[in-house]
Amino acid sequence: MKLFNISLIVGLFLLVSHSGLTAAQSTGPETVKFGPFSTGNWRSDDFKGTAHRQWSETADSFRFDWQTEKGDQIGQIGVSYGSPYLGIKVDDLKAACVMSTDAVYTTPDNHWFYWSIYGWTNKDYTYWSNSQDGKGWDVEFYIIQYTEKPRSEFLKGKGCEDIGSVTVNGEVYACYKTKFENSTQWLAVRQKRTWSGAVNLKTIFSYWRSKGLGNEYIVDLGWALEGFGGSTGTLQLTNTIIPNLMAENKASGHQQ
């Protein structure tokens, strides 16, 4: 589970990518904003390991190399609080609000991770530390595209509830909800695992709404690899589309 982390921007420098576009990279945990986009590498308090991120200035390309010896870490690219792409409530998402990417993944044998669309919602559109007297945002969500974790394992967590399934573009997602002290976690887990492809956010959020999710503001959204203790690998994204949720009459797109 992610707890929002704001650190000084360290370990960041510019380079020229193979495509000729200006790109940037980091080995640190800092959140970096560029244009409407952002990238971060949240790490748990007990984290031990390494990570390297590299991304293009248009956010269509992202590489994440990680090794989690202990704890948990999330490598993410997308949009975060304050982006002109955010500031809309779940019910106001366009009918064809699509998020997509082409992903290539390499790893040794250990596979305990989540590859997902990841983010948060909140009753008010506000920064993490200003919510609930500084306790954070309301809802953490995962639309999991690939994990080795079997379905039965999701229900072993304390308070985890099976809330049925939803079909998106012909693919079935099993859905779960878990309530914590200061937040709720909502999950949709694709039954036929994949790395690449497109997901209609509206369809999944509408299903969650029918199961009790509030009509909250989306305050954080991205493609994310969460590597738990013992996991390691390399993830390369290309042709990535982060939807502009605020754009009128436009389902998705890069920087306007």
Image: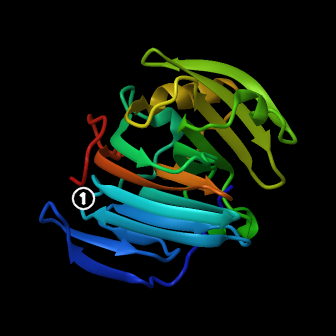
Furthest residue in direction right, as rendered: 158
Q: In this view, does 150 lie above or below 254?
A: above
Furthest residue in direction left, as rendered: 20
- For label 1, count other residues whose C-alpha is less than 10 Å away and answer few (under 14), some (14-19) or many (20+): some
Report the number of numbered marks.
Answer: 1
* Image-quadrant location for residue 38: bottom left
User: Could you say whether the residue bearing mark 1 is in a helix, strand or loop?
Assistant: loop
Q: Where is residue 26 in the image (x, y as percent from the top left)?
A: 40, 75
Q: Can residue 127 be seen in this view?
A: no
Going by the image, does 139 lie left or right of 221? right
Q: Is residue 10 above or below residue 195?
A: below
- Taking the spot 75% from the left edge, 51% from the top edge, the residue there is 183
Going by the image, does 22 lie left or right of 106? left
- Taking the spot 45% from the left edge, 14% from the top edge, the residue there is 170
* Image-quadrant location for residue 63: bottom left
Furthest residue in direction front, as rendered: 109
Residue behind mark 1: 58
- Taking the spot 61% from the left edge, 55% from the top edge, the residue there is 231
- Taking the spot 54% from the left edge, 80% from the top edge, the residue there is 7
